[in-house]
Amino acid sequence: MGSSDDLPRMDRRVAIQWMLSAAATFAARDHLAIAADAPVRAKGYGPDPVMAKIYKPGDLWPLTLTEPQRRTAGALCDVIIPADDASSSASSVGVPDFIDEWISSPYPAQAGDRRVILEGLEWFDEEARRRFSKPFADLTHDQQTAICADVASAKVKPEHRKPASFFKRYRDLTAGGYYTTPEGMQGIGYVGNRPTATFEGPPIEALKHVGLA
Amino acid sequence: MPVITHDKLQENYDVIIVGSGAGGGQTAYTLTMEGVKVLVLEAGRSFDPATEVAMFQLPSQAPLRGVPTPDKQYGFHDCSINSGWEIPGEPYTNAHPEPANQFRWWRQRMMGGRTNHWGRITLRNGPYDFKPRTRFGAGFDWPISYKDVAPYYDKVEMLIGVFGTNEGLENSPDSSPGVLQPAPKLRVGELYAQKHGKKLNARVTSIHRAVLTQVQDAEAIPAKLHPHNATAQRILAEHMRLRAPCFWATDCHRGCSIRANYDSQTVHLRPALATGNLDILPNAMAREVTINKQGRATGIAFIDKTSGREGHAKGRVVVLAASSQESVRLLLNSKSNAFPQGLANSSGKVGKYITDSVSTSLSAHIPAFEGMPIHNEDGAGGPHAYVPWTLHDQNREGGLGFPGGYHLEFTTGRQMPSLTTLNGIDTFEGNGGVLFGKKLKEDARRYYGSRVGFGAQGTMLPNDGSFCELDPTVRDQWGIPVLRFHWKWSDFELNQARHQQKHIGELLEAMGGKVSPKTDADVLKSLKPGGTVIHEVGGAIMGDDPAKSVTNLWSQTWDVKNVFLADGAPFASTADKNPTLTIMALAWRMADHLMDELKKGNI
């Protein structure tokens, strides 16, 4: 929606084509030759998709990540959302698939993330090799955490600015992707979406919690 | 008579209605229950709420976690198809490029129109809302008053099923005894706002929404709504029994396959079809009201979108209920020698005086809600409470710098997580870093549901700078000229927006939230652009004077006696109340008058 705000007289399809070709031009200028970095040519689901159906990443458009990229993506997801006693890890509930779907999206709002994430994953692998001589996915948890901590800190070094902005975005997508799954919802404490015969209002302990009882 | 295809059109109908949403649905219901033969033309396809809506699907079961895309502009699971601010092949234009002069136009091309997608907030206009000129010396008084509409508010509320309480508020009217369904209990955040709002004289009370909280009384209500009409009573009773009360889960915007909330098909069109007096033709894009030599409407020329073929439906009466601006467009496109400026436009007022709700919003994190004991507060798929406008004494003559007032809608609590649920998670403890790992999971649990947001919706009176006309060059994919919009905020709206922001900020602070003060420039930016509240009304306003208005007090055009309007187009201003209930009440009232006129042979 937002992207078309500036283009009130431009047909939406034209606008999308324009933005995609602009993104493609930008990509072509870059020195990085990631195979998956080609512009997305798939079509969207259209204005009348079947809503009452369960979709999974890859159903509607082809995915992007290569196997090595996918390993890095999964490892990074699990540093962000590790398993604990109460809930599972991000990769165990398919969050890397969601991120792959996201960066493979034919829609303009996701086009910027495609580049940021593909480059970011590459940086994490390069950094892992530079410091620990192994791909990121093969590092110990402590080693992975050390790299993440560098780019997650409030005061990042100048050379970490770009990976830091990638990490923030990747964290947002990982956390959002995770908490929208059944396991993530349970983990965060969402217990709705269940039909009940009556609505009883808040329990007494909730009222007490905020000083209403 | 059923949902038909082009080749099954009857030779002639008593009444042709353009549009199947709240106004068209109510008109079709009222007329067919009394034996009038009706055709409804709908530009979108047929849609079955029983099988097509996605009630329980999680965001993880939708593409891109269900976020809005250009194809589904309110998100994947929102009950809207072939709809949006921009629809391929169906452009509209804005005359001025400045952001503050933009009007954005939501079109919902599907059976039932926008009633498939709304919050079901069902508030009555109050007495002051019909008389802004008398009260504030601005805008136009409507040619009707609250007491003219009150009986129809009661009837519509009984028919569609509305929960709420009677609070005896000034200008936020009570319903008659026995009309409302019981209000659901308030959620903890709503109760908390109620307690702490008192410090600011903000009264948090039960909202009115078109959601059944119990089974409708299929014995009593049909007899009240259709006295002396046994057939109508039987049909309505049968359809009321098909509706289940709310099961306290799922967002109403997704639609409701158990028929607990109102949409036009469930409540209006199904019983209307059961009378045998209704044909509905979907995929029919109305192009023009056709006219005979006597200057009377003869029907509607339309494009059959399935074949691209032009068609013509003939009727004695034409009712436009295509959504306010689409009806305006039809009138402007119905040019003839007799009506060179478009139909019913001898006043030059068709397209003039468009208004929308004046709306800003603000949210804050409420520390008291952190670590809330886990519980299910889905409730009735939308708000249970709101803050009605009560500052009448301070604003008796517009002393606050704007006419009318605004109500606050708000969302609290533990809603189904979305992709953006954790937005702001890094700011709560203020170290500026990006949280991850164990700490992120702990904080997610602790802060989830602790944000509260208030959105204001306020009075807008018409001004000379907010109107539409035909674009001189742009046409849609069927060759139909499109609308070009002009939009202008007056000082009234800007003053109101400032008041809203200050008031909401104080309210959030009273609840313990931390709000950063906004500058004056932010206030203009915070105002939602014209049209984006999707409460746009006006463009064919009703009045007492044929030189200054398009319709009389019955929404009947002054110039063409057999053309009526049944959507928001006749509204002479936007109240601080959501318009849908008033659209339905005026449609029922209009339809009663229309039948009187038919009986008298006047049309």
Image (cartoon, coloured by chain):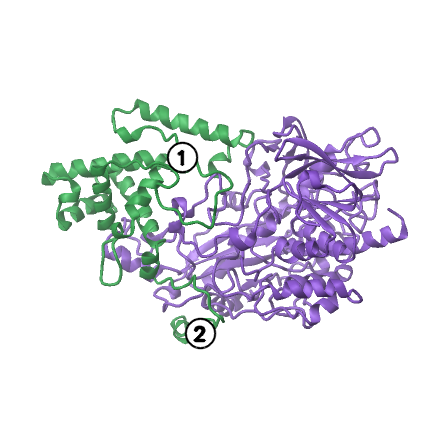
Chain colours: A green, B purple
Element assignment for label 1 = loop
Residue type marked 2: Leu
* Mark 1 or 2, nearer chain start: 1
Q: Position of residue B524 (x, y in %)?
A: 54, 43
Q: Position of residue B13 (x, y in %)?
A: 78, 45
Q: Nearer the viewer, residue A208 or A94?
A: A94
Q: Please report, as a chain letter, where disc 1 is located.
A: A
Residue type marked 1: Pro
What label does residue A212 carry, if any? Answer: 2
What residue is drawn where x is 17% and y is 35%?
A126
What label does residue B526 carry, if any? Answer: none
Q: Position of residue B190 (x, y in %)?
A: 49, 66
Q: Nearer the viewer, residue B68 or B547?
A: B68
Q: Look at the image and tell me whether residue B256 can be seen.
A: yes
In this picture, residue B569 sits left or right of residue B108:
right
In the image, is residue B593 above or below residue A194? above
Element assignment for label 2 = loop
Q: Look at the image and tell me whether residue B172 can be seen.
A: no
Residue beneath disc 1? A106
What residue is drawn where x is 31% and y is 22%?
A29
